[in-house]
Image (cartoon, rainbow, N blue to C red):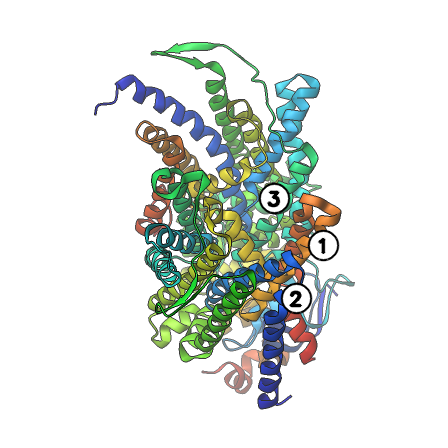
Amino acid sequence: MLLRLEDVQTYYGKSHILHGVSLEVQPGEVVGLLGRNGVGKSTTLKTIAGIVRPAAGQVTFEGKPVAGLPPYRLAHLGIAWVPEDRRVFRLLTVLENLRTGLERPGVSEAQKSALLDKVYAYFPVLAERRSQAGGTLSGGEQQMLAIARAMMLEPKIILLDEPTEGLMPRMVSLIRDIVQRLRQDGVAILLVEQNVPLTLDATSRCYIMEKGAVQYHAPSAELKNNHAVIRQYLGV
Amino acid sequence: MAIPFDQILIQTVTGLVNGMILALVASGLTLIFGIMDVVNFAHGDLVMLGAFVGATTVAVTGSFWLGLLIAAVTLAVFGAAIQITTLRPLLGRDPLTTILATFGISLVLQKYAIWQWGPSARQIVEPISGQFQLFYLQYPWYRILTALLSASIIGALYLFLKFGKYGIWIRATTQDRVMAAAMGIPVPLVHTTVFAIGAAMAAASGVLFGPLGGVTQNMGFDFTLRAFIVVVVGGMGNLGGSILAAIFISLLEAYASLVVSPAQAVIVSFVALILTLLIRPTGLFVPTPK
Amino acid sequence: MSAPRRDYAYWIGFVVVVALLWAAPLVLPGSWGRFATEILIWGLLAMSSDILIGYTGMVSFGHSVFFGLGMYGAAAALLSVKPPNLWLALAYGLVAAAVVSAFVAYFATRLREIYFSITTLVFSQIFYVIIFTWTEVTGGENGLTFSQPPLSFLGLYSARFTPTTLHWFVLAVVVISFLLLRRITQSPFGKVLQSIRENEPRTRAIGYSVERYKIVAVMLSGLFAGLSGILYALQNKFAAPDFVFFVISGEVVIFNVMGGMGTLVGPVAGAAFFFLLREGLSRYFTEYYLIPVGIIFTAMVIFMPQGILGFLRRRLNA
């Protein structure tokens, strides 16, 4: 068991966003988190990443309780967060963006070099633009940078928040490929997405949220054929 | 009424020299604001404390350089202590609260200085004496040294920020502290370190200024006010802007004192602030915001 | 407690306090009587600042300029017109304060938060420098001294002030000011100010001309601050540039924060609290009393931002 949430409640100020979210992710699994807009998917990821503190409930990572720990501790434990708006450091170069995750205690220069090479192999365009400021990249390139940056942490799980949002179809299939390759590398992924077909393809199982809690859970293969459920929770 | 050209040139040199010291003070202030939204009302008092620590060290050891070093290190530690106890709890609250809190700290520091060192002013002997001929004036070498030292310290800061891992940490935290934390950067530590650096720079300015203007218990307010003006005119959080603004304002004041008394020349910087806020509030030396 | 009963209790408390203040110079020994008068004057200054900081959410670091201009305005009247006339002093002082307030209001109100605070500080320093250096007109560093005008009504009645009657005069002015300010803060105008403090963009979106309200708030605040300056001049018979210097503005902010912003009464209590602290702590700390006061103030900013009054209110309501 890599990650488990039990009955997590989270507030933004006075708004009660998460009303008891429970889910789990095994090592190396790719799990989807689906639901309409505003249902609490991003907040769930933020709670796991330590960006917001849960008011109640447990978050356990590799058996240890981590709820309430600051984000930088969680990053060191192996939780990487790729936010919905990417949030690349606009005034830092591509390389400097990557280095924010690369410069960690206990990583040798050789390892850093190898990590960089690996990520440049995944994303050749980033190698090209390595000295360019993050803010000058296109939307798709910024998304790649955000994912590459997360990979610099050598995480055990990547929290991917709507990676295909605003991207061209060509980029969408690129994202699908990246998710595959990450899975092959043994990295678990919790994927929040609005693009249902992509999610069902790329994941082994999916949780569906509504009104701040998980309402449905099934293997993706099964969900693909369950049009009723899809219409109910995800239909417009 | 024509002003002799060499007087103007002399004032230019003076303006540049004063500008460099002011730039050193203002850089610390703007760095602190940029990274943690703290408007440090006590910044000038850190300059003052640095000057006193420096003066005491110089009096005891006879070495100006030791005084500079000890002052910077002492104030760095002290600044870190202040940040941890008083400013960390305020992270996330609006900047007005930080101005109030640092105002309270400023009160304490000013009175503490009097308690610790007594009410009389101190002297710092300049490390190099001697003058050179600048037109009709004998111009002290020390003034030039001050400008060079300030420039070097600021230059070193720039290099530190631009290259090296900690520079990246600081710049990332300044741009997006939440994302920086999510990338494993220990943001609270970065904040404390930056405050310490700002305090050290303030202390260095105080020691450098010592031989020029003396070390007095109420010099703090003047520095704070000037530094605020510079930081606003230069664009809050903009390091390059503060340096340019510091030089700009000091030059304006230097030229103004050809016409009015030095006490009145400060009004020039006040007017510069007000004009900036009216015309280009993001800062005179900031590229137009997109 | 239901609303009418709470109101009732409030007014009873009010009357009691005013009565105590009225009796103060009669029962307290010499300098304590003067002390009471001074607390009233600073209390009025603090109240004026509360309009901005507590109700509109604009922290002014330059209130000393309104105080000082009121003072110098009164001085001008008392020095230039013979025989010295109380009402003329009030008029001149209020006009001076009004002019400065208009000036500051025009330039500073469109600025956000910190910039507004820094600008008010800078403005008060500008006036400080002008007053300090324009020796021919303002007496420069030494300030101006003048004699106290008698209390006179339309040439019919005239009597010199005694410390006690002056105290009562000041008390009357401060009480009337308080009632006026209270009326204003509870009026629709006052509600808009508070709405600006709570959420300026929303207030603007609803359709209120936020700039105009802020300008009026600054002028109101400046006028009453000037009034306190006039009273100070009357009590002490001198005007000095020190009173335009930042220290005064800083103390006003301390009164506001310590007493409780947005309550009108709070800042007055804050002023009293500050002066009592000063009296008490000076015994042990002599002139370094500001060190513990500064520490207390900073701690209050962090842990008790609602001030003493807010703290008590919470306790009493619970």
Do we see residue A37 in this rendering? yes
Instruction: Give the image location of residue C31, x and y in percent.
Output: 63, 56
Q: Secondary structure at mark 3?
A: helix
- Dot label at residue A15: none
User: Do the residues at pointers 1 and 3 share their chain?
Assistant: no
Instruction: Give the image location of residue A100, x and y in percent.
Output: 58, 45
- Dot label at residue C280: 1
Amino acid on which disc 2 is placed: Arg
Q: Which image quadrant: the C terminus of chain A?
A: bottom left
Q: Which residue is mark 2?
A: A53
Q: Quadrant of residue B71?
A: top right
Disc 1 residue crowd, few under 14, some 14–19, many 20+, Cα 10 Å: few
Numbered disc in front, either 2 or 3: 2
Indicate whether B185 appears above or below A215: above
- Looking at this view, name the residue that lies furthest to the right: A63
User: Do the residues at pointers 2 and 1 share their chain?
Assistant: no
Disc 2 residue crowd, few under 14, some 14–19, many 20+, Cα 10 Å: some
CA gap between label 2 and label 1 equals 44 Å
Indicate whether A75 appears above or below B140: below
The answer to the question of whether label 1 and label 3 lie on touching residues, with beta carbons closer than 8 A, is no
- Left or right relative to A65: residue B171: left
- The chain carrying label 2 is A
The answer to the question of whether label 2 and label 1 lie on touching residues, with beta carbons closer than 8 A, is no
- The chain carrying label 3 is A
Instruction: Give the image location of residue A194, x and y in percent.
Output: 49, 72
Amino acid on which disc 1 is placed: Gly
Numbered disc in front, either 1 or 3: 1
- Left or right relative to B178: residue A143: left
Disc 3 residue crowd, few under 14, some 14–19, many 20+, Cα 10 Å: many
Q: Which residue is mark 3?
A: A102
